[in-house]
Amino acid sequence: MRSSLDDLRYLEAVDRLGSASAAGRDLGVAPSTVYRRIATLERDVGFACLARTRGITPAGRELAALARTTTVTLAEIARRARAHRDELTGTITLTTIDGFAPMLVRPIAALATTYPQLRVDVHVSDSGLSLRRQEADIGLALLASPPPVLVGRRLFPVPFGVFGTRAVTADPERARWVVLGAPSHTSWLGRWERAHVPRERIALATPSRRLLVDLIGAGVGLGLMATRLAVDRPDLIEVRSYRAAAAPLTVSAWLLTHPDRRKDARVQLVMKELARHLTS
C-alpha cells in the first residue's frame, strides 16, 4: 500500500468537518489538495472513499474512523481495506440494448480483473429487464429523460445519422436500405425509417442493432444508426443529406438503477466503472 498515514488525515478531516473546504482550512491547504490526496488514497485502497455529491462513503467513514485511532497501524488499515474489497462478491445484473454491447467490453474486463469475486450478468434486449420491478440492478439505456422512479446519471448525447459504405453512398437516391425488423420496427427509430425509407428499397430487416451495423459495413445498404457506433468504422460514411431529418432523433445515454439499490456497494462500484469508461 503506497499511501502513508498522512493521506488519511485529509479523509478524516472531511469526515469530521463535513466538507473539503472546511478540511482544507483546518489543514492549511486548498480544497483541491484535499480532493487530490483522497483520490490517491482511493487508488491505493481500491474503493471510493468520497463522492463529491454525496459525501463520505460507508467504506470511507470506516477508514476515517481508523485514522482517528492512533494505535491502528498502516498494515491493519490495508488489511481492513482488502477485507472490504473482498466483500464485493455476488452477482450484479446489467440490462441494456445490443447497440451498447461493444462499449461494455473495457469496463467489464476491468471489473473482472480487479474484483474476481464479483459477477456481472449482462442482459441484452430491446425490451430489457425491468429496473422498476428490480429484475435488474443497473440499466444502460437510450432515453430522452429517465422515469422519475429511477435514479442515475446522464452519460452523453447520442445523435443519429444515415451511414453506408463508400460504394453505397455514391448514389444514395438509389441505394437499398437495412432497417429495424420486428419487434423494433415499432420503436421511435422504426417510425423514422417508415417515414423516410421507401419499402421497395429495403434490402433487409433485423431487430439487432449490432447486426444492422455489420450489414451496413458489409455494403448491404444504407442504414440509420447512432453516430457513436460509426466512429470506429472507417468503412462507413455519413450521408449528410439526411442529417437535418435525423437531428430530432438525438437522445441521451443514461446509467440508471432503482433507488432501493443505489446504496449497494456493488451497484455503486459497477456504475462508477461503467461511467468512467463510457465517458472517457
Image (cartoon, helix red, strand yellow):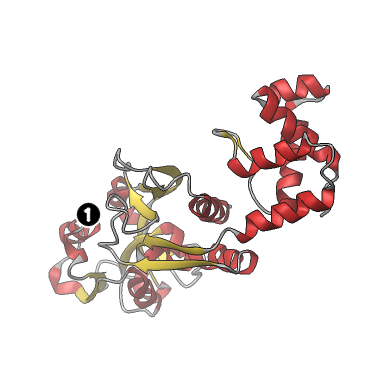
Question: What is the number of callouts on the image?
Answer: 1
Q: Extreme front residue here? A: 71
Q: Is residue 55 above or below residue 233?
A: above
Q: Residue at x 38, y 55 (%)?
A: 139
Is residue 62 or residue 177 the one in the foreground? 62
* Location of residue 12 with respect to 171 vertically, above or below: above
Q: Is residue 118 left or right of residue 189?
A: right
Answer left or right for 254 relative to 32: left
Task: Write down the residue under mark 1.
Answer: 188
* Residue found 36% across the figure and 67% down from its top: 123
Instruction: Please state which amino acid type lies under the numbered disc 1.
Output: Trp
In percent of the image, x 70 and y 57: which residue is there?
82
Q: Is residue 231 visible?
A: yes
Picture quadrant of residue 277: bottom right
**Which percent across, then down, holds residue 19?**
65, 25
Front residue (pair 237, 38): 38
Residue 263 in picture, x, y percent from top left: 48, 44
